[in-house]
Amino acid sequence: MNQLTYEDHTFDKLIYTEQRVMGREFQSCTFKNCDLSGTDFSTTKFLECTFESCNLSMAKFERTTLTDVIFKGCKLMGINFSITQSFMFSVSFEDCVLDYSSFMDKKMVKSSFKKTSLKEVTFSRAVLTGSVFDECDLNSAIFNQTDLTSVNFATSYNYIIEPELNTIKKAIFSAQGLPGLLTSYGIKIV
């Protein structure tokens, strides 16, 4: 990854851990089966890129641009997405592990999370309007002052969301998920 700009390039089985890949631009690139864990991508731009079956755990994304980026089958544990560039931030996740990551203060309108583990992920003060959480495990995820307007949680589970602390107007929950909305009231559901 010595070039400054890559376009329509496929990276396959690349092992590039704990490296510095700063100030680069990747346009319409595909990363397959790559281990990029711990790599510093600060000030790098990923535009319309796809990551498939990659390990990006503990990677650093300070002031990184993520626009129309798709992650499929990836491990992204401990990522602080809250320090990425906010302008044009657009990501989707399918069959990923995002445990212990943070989306604090991110505006993520109509984002898609499918079959993804989001254990202990922080969504505090995030704007998730119109997003979909499809079959996601949200065990111990933090929602605090989060805009969840029209968010679909119908098939997700293990969430605890306090209605007084979050905007949940028009959000969709399953009947099985209702206990996660009532936990703070100390109500016993049988």
Image (cartoon, helix red, strand yellow):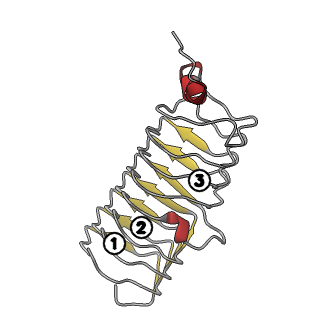
Kindly indicate whether the residue at mark 1 contacts the one at mark 2 (C-beta within 8 angstroms): yes
- Please name whichever residue, 115 or 140, is drawn nearer the observer in this view of the structure: 140
Image position of 75 (left or right of 140): left
Among numbered discs 2 and 1, the one appearing first in the sequence? 1
List x then y, in percent, for residue 81. Answer: 50, 64
Q: Nearer the viewer, mark 3 or mark 1?
A: 3
| Separation of residues labelled 3 and 1 (CA atoms) | 34 Å
| Amino acid under disc 2 | Thr
Q: Secondary structure at mark 3?
A: loop
- Please name whichever residue, 90 or 9, is drawn nearer the observer in this view of the structure: 90
List x then y, in percent, for residue 87. Answer: 66, 72
Task: Give the answer, above or below, for where 120 lies relative to 44.
Answer: above
Bin the neighbour count of mark 2 within 10 Å (Cα to Cα): few under 14, some 14-19, many 20 and up. some
Bin the neighbour count of mark 3 within 10 Å (Cα to Cα): few under 14, some 14-19, many 20 and up. many
Q: Quadrant of residue 133?
A: top right
The residue that mark 1 highlights is: 11
Among numbered discs 3 and 1, the one appearing first in the sequence? 1
The residue that mark 2 highlights is: 30
The residue that mark 3 highlights is: 124
Q: Quadrant of residue 164?
A: top right
| Amino acid under disc 3 | Ser
Question: Which residue corresponds to the image point at 58% horizontal and 30% vertical from the top-left?
Answer: 184
Question: Which residue corresponds to the image point at 57% horizontal and 59% vertical from the top-left?
Answer: 104
| Separation of residues labelled 2 and 3 (CA atoms) | 31 Å
Q: Secondary structure at mark 1?
A: strand
